[in-house]
Image (spheres, grey):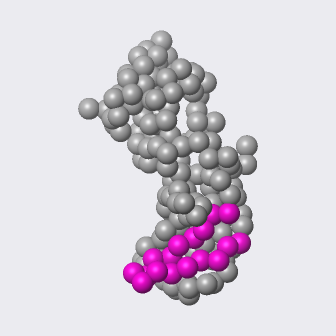
Amino acid sequence: MDTQRRFRTTVSVDQRGRTIVPIPFDPDEAWGAKPRHPVRGSVAGCSMRGTVEKQEDGPLVTLGPAWTQVPLRDGAEVEVVLEPEGPQRADLAPDIAAALDSEPDAATFFDSLAQFYRKAWLRWIDSTKRNPEQRPVPIAEMVRHLQEGRKERP
């Protein structure tokens, strides 16, 4: 599944020097419904990481003034490449995906986590490779903690 999106858009720069990048598509339709969409990619050829924010006039990414060496001017038309950051649900092992599918609240919370937290959960579950019969235990524990709103293991 190709999740990368490439498009041209006109950026604006606010009084604080932040670059606002309008997103011309619905990220929920492109990448699945989530409360937050952490993304990585490039704007005008400069690498970036950020979060798609849902606003009344459409989704956008706001980049701080330090994100690039060469600031863009207000009204500049730029090439943008974006893709979801970190492991996505489509990338998960079938047993983990099934566990999250069975508990929608946990799945929604997992989807909202930054990649650091998602990767940490998956590394912890993968640590059972020597004892595969133990794998369901950390998966169940992860789901329980996600339902409680915990980003990481206590």
The residue most toward the front is 56
- Queried whether the magenta region covers residue 20, the answer comes back as yes
Image quarter where the N terminus lies is: top right
| Residue placed most toward the observer, 108 or 79 | 108
| Residue 118 % position (x, y) | 45, 40
Q: Residue at x 63, y 84 (%)?
A: 76
Q: Residue at x 46, y 80 (%)?
A: 14
Residue 1 appears in the rendering: yes
| Residue 31 % position (x, y) | 64, 46
Residue 42 appears in the rendering: no
| Residue placed most toward the observer, 142 or 105 | 105
- Queried whether the magenta region covers residue 89, the answer comes back as no
Q: In which quarter of the image is residue 98?
A: top right
| Residue 125 % position (x, y) | 44, 27
Image quarter where the C terminus lies is: top left
| Residue 32 % position (x, y) | 62, 42
The residue most toward the left is 154
Rendered view: 18 above or below 38: below
Rendered view: 63 above or below 128: below
Q: Which residue is drawn at 48% across and 12% down?
A: 133
Q: Quadrant of residue 121?
A: top left
- First to last magenta residue range: 8-24
Rendered view: 127 above or below 2: above
Question: How many numbered discs, if any?
Answer: 0
- Side of 37 where 23 appears, left or right: right
| Residue placed most toward the observer, 11 or 137 | 11
